[in-house]
Image (cartoon, rainbow, N blue to C red):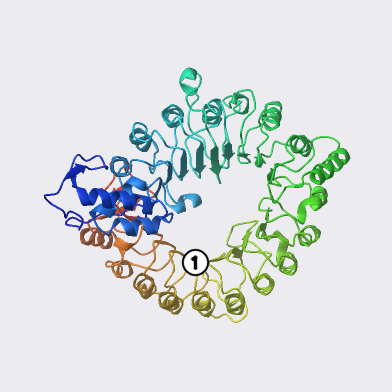
Amino acid sequence: MEEVSEMPAGGEGDGGKGLQCFPDPGGTGAQMPFFDHILENVLENVLCFLTSRRDRNAASLVCKSWYRAEAQTRIELFIGNCYAVSPSRAVGRFRRVRSLVLKGKPRFADFNLVPLEWGARLTPWLTAMAPAYTCLEQICLKRVTVADDDLFLLACSFPRFRDLSLICCDGFTTAGLAIIAQNCRYGIHLSIQGISDRFTTAGLYQFESWFSSTRNLRSLDLIENDVEDDEDEAVDWVSMFPPGNTCLESLVFDCVACPVNFEALASLVARSPFLQRLRVNEHISAGHLCQLLARAPQITDLGTGSFAASGDADDAETALESAFHASKSLSCLSGFRGIAAEYLHTIHPVCAHLTSLNFSYALISPQQLTPIITCCPNLETLWVLDSVGDDGLQMVAASCRKLKKLTVFPLEATEDSEGSVSDVGLIAISAGCRKLRSILYFCQRMTNNAVVTMSQNCQELVVFRLCIMGRHRPDHLTGEPMDEGFGAIVKNCKNLTRLAVSGLLTDVAFAYIGKYGKLLRTLSVAFAGNTDLSLRYLLQGCPRLQKLEIRDCPFGDAGLLSGIDHYYNMRFLWMSSCRLSLNGCEEVARALPRMVVEVIKDMPGVENDSVQKLYMYRSLVGPRNDAPTFVNIL
């Protein structure tokens, strides 16, 4: 993994024998030569200016002195796979960490392809960090299982703690939010977006005196999954914030499925004069939103909640328009859940200043989008559903010349759905939005010409993710494979680091990717390829590839074995519904002892030679000890 580089045995840096020695600042008890001690003091002052984790990793491999100095100065630690290193090993090496990013389950967990209870629990990491990281301020967790006990331990172990981001996590409910809120004496940033919920309320109030030690909470981000409680178990977590003024900068809970105490929320917003981001859930009506905006006119990032009235519609419409007129600082808008289309015009007063607009939950037509998007000349980021159609995308192209990131989600993510966007919309975007850097585009119909045009018009693309829904869909005009389109993308977009391919693709497309995709770090392949040569081209042709995700492709053991010399340089490989055998996976495991090879079964108890899911990742500590019965570690 990128964040932990290991100094090989026998490395340089132990010269100066016989000179005066000083204790090793890394805490190992070893004695350091005088000149090495001076060198490490200098290095520590220099390394403080290195902010890129890849640069720091490279520096740590120079020699033993650099290795020690880099560890002593690293305050931000990124763990891309919680099983790639043990908590004790990470804590033992990096003693001054203030910010931790920890990732757990594979990304395909987002698509229900990773069984529940697969693992990635926070508990062992918190247990190791609690006594060691007394200066820890920030934690960001992604696809990690977080229990109520974990939140309690976090609340009482880190006196300087300020930021907690939980992204695609599971394991807790509003009771856990109450634990965090109750400790937020001088909170700065609480954001909640989308977490599952499976922890109990036991112990919520038992240790109230302990909680007072954590007074600096700044963020709690829950992203992409819902927080849902049984009606009789939901906790009024917003009311748990202590009284008095706060330094809260961000409060985001748009994914929380249960209602919140609006009076408590309005009071919290009113006593948070530094609040910059507020994203509320679907239980906040348009009328309530107006009241919140009146209490926080300084907000720059707003999630609107339901954007529908609960009472008199005419009064709500008028009040909304007035509220947006008074909100001079808004630059980011999202939410619009359960949107009332007749209210859309009320956001006109802020459109000219918007740099980000998220309509990914708003079912709106091209006619409804047009009067809004034509007033957004400074827009840089846009999310929409494909309900806006090609006509809507043409208006985006004509109006948003500064657009850098576009995401078009499907209204119905099924193979046989009738998508409303196509190659026509993609061509329009490529012609009008020449500054585009990232695109995720779901569609049912595409052509090589459209993708080639995109590659010619938007050559600064860094991320290109084209998801042609349906299996093996060709160019819908010519019937040809989509080889030339994706070939043009990797050939013309020389800064491309992330690519997702789909549609009818042959080995030719993957030969292009292997030949030109020299900067690719993340590659996703679905329903594509025709022989094992495709996989060989990728593994042997993309030297910087870190993450390779493959599903429903005709790749077998020969393709898997073609990457033997390359897997140690990758963070992980995921393959599901391919043509792998248990013997082929075992051969890889024997050849690569420092790779963990997991075979995941969809149907435990069914024994056969075929492999349903393969998850392979590099690890410094070997196989994990918490694998469930449906995971076979080879």
Left or right: 319, with 259 as reference point: right
Residue assigned mark 1: 499
Left or right: 416, with 201 as reference point: right
Q: Can residue 606 be seen in this view?
A: no
Residue 591: x %, y % from top left: 21, 62
Which residue appears at 70% of the width and 68% of the height?
401
Viewer-closest of 235 and 558: 235
Q: Is residue 580 visible?
A: yes
Dot 1 amino acid type: Leu
Choose top left, top right, bottom left or bottom right for residue 27: top left
Left or right: 122, with 35 as reference point: right
- In this rendering, is residue 145 above or below 433? above
- In this rendering, is residue 220 above or below 4? above
Q: Mark 1, residues whose alpha carbon is within 10 Å: few (<14), some, or many (≥20)?
A: many
Which quadrant holds the N terminus?
bottom left
Which residue appears at 82% of the width and 52% of the height?
345
- In this rendering, is residue 159 above or below 358? above
Element type where label 1 sits in the image: strand
Residue 551: x %, y % from top left: 44, 61
Residue 64: x %, y % from top left: 23, 53
Choose top left, top right, bottom left or bottom right for residue 193: top right
Q: How many marks?
A: 1
Residue 459: x %, y % from top left: 57, 74
